[in-house]
């Protein structure tokens, strides 16, 4: 009998820029998405490097070549994007996903249209992908100085990914949907644990909620409670990285979605409440006793020196993509 792997769909959100949605396909099959869904922004060919040069390293194909700056034009001030670590986080995650068999990655940017930067990273990643966009409405964006928890983050992008699933997948197609964050750390074993999900599977998440870990409490193979330090009365006191959803269950509930106006900490509950009850959750990771995902955070870079040099017209070369 041929071994078949259940599809896994992973949704990943990068704050204020990009949400990612991944699908694990049947091992050994061709990608299942229509070709036009996978087109990335065109990347002009790079000149071949000299492999015999002592400092040779594989060429960076994450972005197209740019023309050299005009030597007769004075340098112009260049200000960093809101999230200067964006490309670095995408590259880091792609290196993990490369080791997961039968995976498809759907990126949903928080923008009016997909960007060339993200498209270039995806095209060079070696991972099968789809690149979409969904812009957060202005009334759901925080103003400068507002706390990050004032509005749920990534709801519009995750809902766009869910809509894409419902538009392109058959109701009887097996699969698993997983939501992830841009700077989390994932064990490869996590993807194998979730692969058998039929309803909603759950597991612990490390370094989250002000605790060493949050996790479902399991007795005789059933979830009977939750170890959490904040608002334990929530219907589903789970982190976004702590559950996965069976594709067939999702497609059987077309109204299930994330509420972009959900109360703080209730975004996950707004979605899961339309699918299952807490008693129906499926524990994984040795009855929720092993941590396979960590809610790590990328440190925000301090660019004061860069800003000072930019004001003097001597900032870093803006033609080099970071």
Image (cartoon, rainbow, N blue to C red):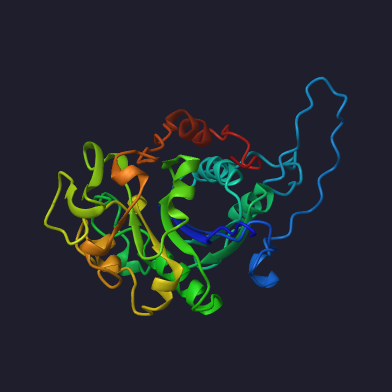
Residue 110 in sight = no
In the displayed orientation, state which residue is furthest to the front. Answer: 1
- Tell me which residue sits at (46%, 62%) in the image: 176
Give the image location of residue 274, x and y in percent.
Answer: 28, 73
Give the image location of residue 53, x and y in percent.
Answer: 85, 23
Q: Is residue 20 left or right of residue 156?
A: right
Tell me: residue 243, above or below residue 90.
below
Rendering quarter of residue 278: bottom left
Rendering quarter of residue 91: top right
Give the image location of residue 33, x and y in percent.
Answer: 63, 69
**Total of numbered circles in the picture?**
0
Rendering quarter of residue 51: top right
Give the image location of residue 248, x and y in percent.
Answer: 44, 72
- Tell me which residue sits at (68%, 57%) in the image: 28
> What quarter of the picture does the N terminus occupy?
bottom right
Q: Is residue 178 left or right of residue 115?
A: left
Q: Is residue 253 left or right of residue 12?
A: left
Comparing 164 with 23, the one in front is 23
- Tell me which residue sits at (35%, 67%) in the image: 138
Q: In this view, does 188 lie to the left or right of 46?
A: left
> What quarter of the picture does the C terminus occupy?
top right
Residue 112 in sight = yes
Tell me: residue 205, above or below residue 38.
above
Comparing 81 with 89, the one in front is 89
Comparing 271 with 145, the one in front is 271
In the displayed orientation, state which residue is furthest to the top. Answer: 54
């Amino acid at each position: 009998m041929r071994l078949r792997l259940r599809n896994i769909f992973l949704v990943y959100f990068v704050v204020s820029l990009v949400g990612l949605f991944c699908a694990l396909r049947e091992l050994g099959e061709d990608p299942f998405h229509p070709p036009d869904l996978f087109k990335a922004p065109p990347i002009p060919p790079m000149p071949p490097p000299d492999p015999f040069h002592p400092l040779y390293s594989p060429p960076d194909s994450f972005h197209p070549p740019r023309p050299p700056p005009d030597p007769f034009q004075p340098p112009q001030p260049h200000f960093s994007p809101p999230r200067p670590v964006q490309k670095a986080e995408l590259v880091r995650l792609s290196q993990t996903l490369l080791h997961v068999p039968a995976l498809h990655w759907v990126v949903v940017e928080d923008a009016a249209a997909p960007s060339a930067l993200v498209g270039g990273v995806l095209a060079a990643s070696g991972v099968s992908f789809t690149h979409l966009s969904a812009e957060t409405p202005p009334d759901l964006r925080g103003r400068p100085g507002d706390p990050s928890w004032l509005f749920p983050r990534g709801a519009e992008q995750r809902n766009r990914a869910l809509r894409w699933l419902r538009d392109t997948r058959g109701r009887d197609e097996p699969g698993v949907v997983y939501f992830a964050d841009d700077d989390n750390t994932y064990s490869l074993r996590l993807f194998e644990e979730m692969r058998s999900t039929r309803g909603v599977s759950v597991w612990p998440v490390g370094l989250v909620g002000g605790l060493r870990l949050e996790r479902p409490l399991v007795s005789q193979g059933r979830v009977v409670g939750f170890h959490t330090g904040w608002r334990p009365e929530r219907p589903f006191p789970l982190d976004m990285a702590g559950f996965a959803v069976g594709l067939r269950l999702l497609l059987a509930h077309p109204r299930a979605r994330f509420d972009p106006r959900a109360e703080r900490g209730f975004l996950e509950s707004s979605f899961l409440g339309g699918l299952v009850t807490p008693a129906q959750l499926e524990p994984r990771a040795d009855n929720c006793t092993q941590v396979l995902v960590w809610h790590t955070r990328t440190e925000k870079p301090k660019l004061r020196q860069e800003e000072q040099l930019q004001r003097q017209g001597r900032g870093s070369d803006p033609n080099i993509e970071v």
